[in-house]
Amino acid sequence: MSRPIEEIKADIEEYKHRFVNSKLSDNGISPSSFCDAIQIFEKELKEALIESIPLDRLEEICNAERDGRCVVLPCKVGDKVQAAVNRPFNGHNLTIHGEVIEIQPVVRVRHSEIRYVDFIATDFEKTVFLTQELSEQTKEHENK
């Protein structure tokens, strides 16, 4: 098992810092040694990144990032949160302390007759489709 990613990144930063300081004092790391070490750290970092994630999942994530569909959520289920709710509750603003129990990314779709409609991301390929053709194929399959 590889080292934690944060540890590898910290080692890279430390090595860069040592290289800069050694260049200033003229008694340290040669540029070629520095490049070799950074390449080793980068290889270790890449291996650590792909070790626990299947390649097909990494491909899916990379494609989503390129397409602008990748979102990093601000929390996970089980996180403790505090929120100030700006709606008056019994004449007072409300501060909520709680635990995240579910996360459902929402896709907001602009509509010509109403302002917008929100769909839960898991609705896609079930009741929400990216093309008319996919929608019709799903309806045909359900009717069989």
Image: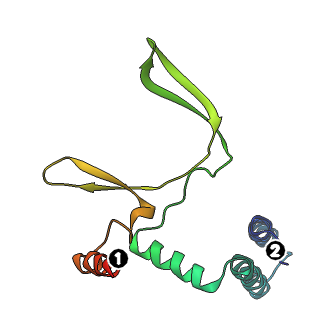
Residue at the left extreme?
A: 113
The outermost residue toward the front is 144
Q: Nearer the viewer, mark 2 or mark 1?
A: 1
Number of the label disc, if any, that sits on residue 15? none
Residue in the image at 46% along x and 56% along y: 105
Where residue 109 sits, quadrant-wise, is bottom left
Residue 142 badge: 1
Q: Quadrant of the N terminus?
A: bottom right
Residue 69 percent location from the top left of the image: 42, 68
Q: Is residue 116 left or right of residue 97?
A: left
| Pointer 1 local density, CA inside 10 Å: few below 14, some 14–19, many at least 20 | few
Tell me the number on the disc at residue 26.
Answer: 2
- Front residue of this view, candidates 101 and 55: 101
How far from the left and from the top, in percent, is residue 114? 17, 47
Q: Position of residue 129 (x, y in %)?
A: 31, 71
Disc 2 residue crowd, few under 14, some 14–19, many 20+, Cα 10 Å: few
Residue at (56% x, 24% y) in the render: 95
Q: CA–CA distance between discs 2 and 1?
A: 74 Å
Q: Amino acid at mark 2?
A: Asp
- For label 2, the SS is loop
Query: Please, what is the three-letter code of the amino acid marked with disc 1?
Result: Glu
Q: Residue at x 49, y 54 (%)?
A: 104
**Residue 33 point in image, percent of width and height:** 79, 86
